[in-house]
Image (spheres, rainbow, N blue to C red):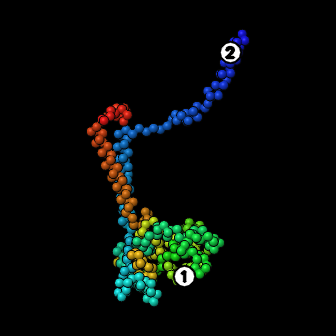
Amino acid sequence: MDSEGGSSSGTGQRTSSASPASRRPTAYYKFTQQNLPACKPVLTPGWVFTTFLLIGVLFIPVGFVGLRASESVVEIVERYDTECIPELYRSNKVAYVKDDSISKNCTRFLKVQKHMKAPIYIYYQLDNFYQNHRRYVKSRNDRQLLYGLKYNDTSSCQPEEHMNGLPIVPCGLTAWSLFNDTFTFFRDGIELRVNRKNIAWKSDREHKFGKHVYPFNFQNGSLIGGKMLDPNIPLSEQEDLIVWMRTSALPNFRKLYGRIEEDLEANDYIAVNLANNYNTYSFGGKKKVVLSTSTWLGGKNNFLGVAYIAVGSLCIVVAFVFVLLHMKNPRPYGDTAFLTWNRKSTF
């Protein structure tokens, strides 16, 4: 009896100790064992063909719409860096641009080929200017742009860190090389008003450049880089600087200069009085002034439309290639003989 009782007691203890495992949540167990219900799409030939064909049918019309929007942009591009040099200095352009005694004023005439609806965006374009150069990009201090002289560590701004023993605000090569050509536009002898407000990103004006930070000791050295800054205007309102400090990733780039807020008619002639101050001659760069309208897709850029058409066309070609391959070498669905580990080695 005792042995049976002991056996019964032992059995009861074993049953009791095993019960927590048996009460383990089923959902947890299925999750850890990856046995939960899941969507497992099967890529049958029909689904593959339909998917590629559908992508192609959708992408190609979108691409043509994008191309049409890009082609509707009216754009005038005028290169002026070579034409605005006096004949005497054509053989030594660097000496011309560095000589302050020589007038840099120049006039170019632009013909409007098609009606340009306001707002008309004015850009300056620089070619062969590597704003993405590692040393150039690093030669700045974003905290100083926001806090000014309150932030003292400007070692990253070398070699434009100090001048005459005093800190420079804004410091660094990026700010020092600020573009300093100017443009004035006339139609029939009447100056066109150029709006130069709100040309920079709102987030940059409000969060990256201090509202109480003013230029200090800027361009006071013997070697002047680019545009001077008004020491009485805070950096958050110096939008030319803000636009320039958003460096470009490519060597050929455009930056917004302003907006003409009145329409230009076809066959109008626009006189551009400009100051050819910026030195692109020492590194073989080019300078252009650009007038451009915009659409719902932005400025003139055919890349997006061409990319959609190319991808759509490729998908349609791939779809028909799959169909031809399936018709030439059909096989039953789920035939395990085609699995790699079931194939006989030929070696």
Packing grade of label 1 (10 A; few <14, some 14-19, many >=20) is: few
Q: How many C-alpha atoms fall within 10 Å of the one at disc 2: few (<14), some, or many (≥20)?
A: few
Question: Residue sitting at 35 percent across and 49 percent down?
Answer: 315
Which residue position holds label 2? Answer: 7
When asked about the image quadrant of residue 267, the answer is bottom left
Instruction: Give the vertical position of 143 relative to 268 (above or below).
Output: above
Q: Quadrant of the N terminus?
A: top right
Outermost residue toward the top? Answer: 1
Residue at image coords 46%, 75%? 260
Residue pushed farthest left? Answer: 328
Which residue in the rendered view is the most extreme toward the bottom? 101
Taking the view exactly as shown, the residue that stands out farthest to the right is: 2
Left-right relation of 17 to 56 = right
Q: Is residue 274 in view?
A: no
CA distance separating discs 1 and 2: 100 Å
Nearer-the-camera pick, 135 or 270: 135
| Labels 1 and 2: the sequence-earlier one | 2
What amino acid is found at the position of numbered circle 1 in the picture?
Answer: Gly
Kind of residue at badge 2: Ser
Looking at the image, residue 318 sits to the left or right of residue 275; the answer is: left
Where is mark 1, residue-wise?
221
Q: Is residue 3 above or below residue 68?
A: above
Tell me if label 1 and label 2 are in contact, CB under 8 Å.
no
Query: Percent from the top left, x then y, of residue 19?
Result: 64, 25
